[in-house]
Amino acid sequence: MQSTLIPHLLHLPEYEVTVCVDIDEEAAETARRMSHARYRVNAVEEIDMSEIDAALVAMPSDVAGSVTRFLIKNNIACFVEKSPANTSDEIEDLLTLARLRDVYVQIGFNYRYADAIANFYTRTAPYRERPCVATLDFRSKHPSSSEWGIEDPVAAWLYHNGVHMLDLLRWLLGDVEHVHAELVEAAPPGKFLLVVQARHSNGSVSTIRMGNMTGHFDIRLDLFTLEAHQFYMPHLGEVTQSLRDGRVAGDVLYRTPNLDNGRGRAGYGPELRYFAQNFQQSTTTAPSLADTLKASQLCDMILQSLDRQNLMKPEMLSHR
């Protein structure tokens, strides 16, 4: 909240922050000063709901669900950082409640709004209606241990970080029907690379390589179409068309050196602008709780595939 949401929220001058909430009084006061809020409280139940139109929820996923549920029950539109809960069942319960109350809930999958990815999405739209082949790379060093109520380090990373890439995957190529996952573990303990092959309902095939094996952030997209066009995003500052009709093209479609603290480059600014422009609707276009549920279910599928692979491994016998 302090490092990302509040700084970019302040770029929306037509809105003001009424109240900041945190169980830690010092954190609540810091957020209040940063956002110029009128007051602070230590629990969401202490808020006068008649004073607010919408809420931003940025907290660990093992407690975010109860706060989001409370806000939905009070008919408050919500922007919720991913993930809004730790399990697909909990997310589905939130989705059911939001639909019942006609409450707008947007999830913070900010990379959908990143300038380069939005350009990549638009440029490839005419070709993604038919089967494509995509490769997605995503590496981020945290977490490398259990986190927010999820004991397995791989599962914690997948549900709390890798889910970003799975949302992008569905956004680009549609729902996934089948996955096969392999896990490559490295030293030191907690470092790994997940390789996932997915088949989509429209016949597209994708390969995802993601994990925390490297100590830096890295995101890349590659798409090959039935027309033998190839589009490539090597990082969040560039999109190229490397092949056209199977021939080398090398056209630069988008390029920027601007880091802008993640406002447009990582999508933080545009996603908050989208929320501010749309939260008074009863329907969330995207990314919604429905999108989050499908991304979480895709996490479930990947972990189930890993479990199957482990069960199929032959037992190691020792000779005395």
Image (spheres, grey):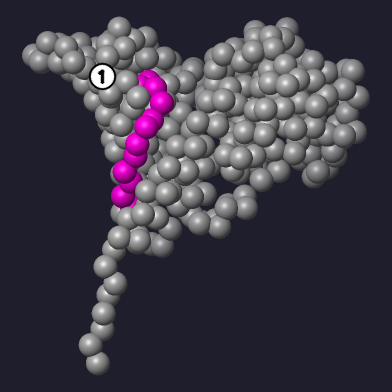
Residue 160 seen from this side: yes
Where the N terminus falls, by quadrant? top right
**Which of the two residues, 110 or 73, is positioned nearer the viewer here?**
73
Residue 137 seen from this side: no
Q: Is residue 130 left or right of residue 107?
A: left
Q: Is residue 238 left or right of residue 81?
A: left
Percent position of residue 249, x then y: 14, 12
Q: Residue at x 61, y 15 (%)?
A: 284
- Secondary structure under badge 1? loop
Instruction: Say which residue label 1 marks.
Output: 131
Percent position of residue 203, x then y: 28, 23
Which secondary structure dominates the residues rendered in magenta?
strand
* Magenta segment boundaries in residue numbering: 172-183
Q: Quadrant of residue 29?
A: top right
Percent position of residue 142, x then y: 48, 47
Percent position of residue 58, x then y: 67, 34
| Residue furthest out toward the bottom | 320
* In the rendered image, the vertical position of residue 99 relative to residue 127, given as above or below: below
Q: Quadrant of residue 88?
A: top right
Could you tell me the amino acid type at mark 1? Pro
